[in-house]
Image (cartoon, helix red, strand yellow):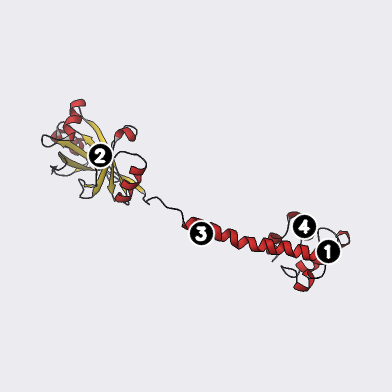
Amino acid sequence: MQGNRNALLPEGLVSSIFPRNPNTLATPPGRLSPPLRSLASHLTTWPRPSPSFLAGSAASRDLAGCFSKFLNRVPAVRSFSASQSLHQVADPVWNLGQLNHVAIAVPDLKKSTAFYQNILGAQVSEVVPLPEHGVSVVFVNLGNTKMELLHPLGNDSPIAGFLQKNKAGGMHHICIEVDNINAVMMDLKKKKIRILSEEVKIGAHGKPVIFLHPKDCGGVLIELEQA
C-alpha cells in the first residue's frame, strides 16, 4: 500500500511522511505543520485521505484538488498512448532466417563436382538442369548449409557472362531464407533497394525467390528465398 501512496504524493512530502521504516515517521510529528500531521495520520492507514478529512479546511481542500487533478490525468495519458499506437501504420513484417546456400560459378561442372566429392568427401547431388534460370546445378551438402555449383545452360545464361569476366569461376551469390517473401519485396522497394525481377520467381529448390542488385548490397548478389 505504501508504494501506491508514494505515487500520489510530491517527492518532498513522501520523504517527510514515509521513511524506510514504515513504523516511524521520517520527520517527528511535532515538526510537521497541522495539515501534514493530519494527512500523515490518514495516509498511514489508507492510501487516500477520507472525504471528511478532505472537507475539513481550506488547506486540505486545496490538497484534495491537487489529488483529484493528478488522478484524473493518469487515465487520460494512458488512453492517449494506446490510441496513438493503434493509429501507427506498421511496415510489412518479415524476418531474416539462416544461410541457405553459397553459389559458385564453375567453368567445368564435372571437374568441380569431382573435387568436392572425391577430394573433400562431400555429399553431392546429380546434375539438375534449370533452363528457366539458364544454369545446370550440382548441390553440395555441407550439413549446416549447402553450396550450389552453377554452370551455364543455354545461350542466355547469366552465368556465361560471369565466367567471361572470371575465367576460373568464383562465388556468384549467397542465398538467405526469409519468412515472408512478399513482405520482403514490398519493404525493400520502399527502401529503394533494387530487385532484379518485377515479381517473385521460383528458384532452384522449388521455392519463391528474389535477387537483390549487388550495387545495393555491398557488391554481393543476394538471393532471398522463402523458408
Q: Mark 3 or mark 4: which comes first in sequence?
A: 4
Q: Nearer the viewer, residue 77 or 4?
A: 77
For disc 2, the neighbor class at 10 Å (few under 14, some 14 to 19, many from 20) is some
Q: Secondary structure at mark 2?
A: loop
Q: Secondary structure at mark 3?
A: helix
To which residue does mark 3 refer? 83
* Residue found at x 37% / y 41%: 191
Amino acid type of the residue that numbered disc 3 sits on in the rendered structure? Ser
Regarding residue 79, the answer to whether it shows in the image is: yes
**Does label 2 or label 1 sit earlier along the sequence?**
1
> Disc 3 versus disc 2: distance between alpha carbons?
40 Å
Q: Residues within 10 Å of mark 3 (few under 14, many from 20)?
A: few
Residue at the spot of label 1: 35
> Which amino acid type corresponds to the residue marked 1 in the rendered image?
Pro
Can you identify the residue that label 2 sits on?
196
Q: Residue furthest right?
A: 30
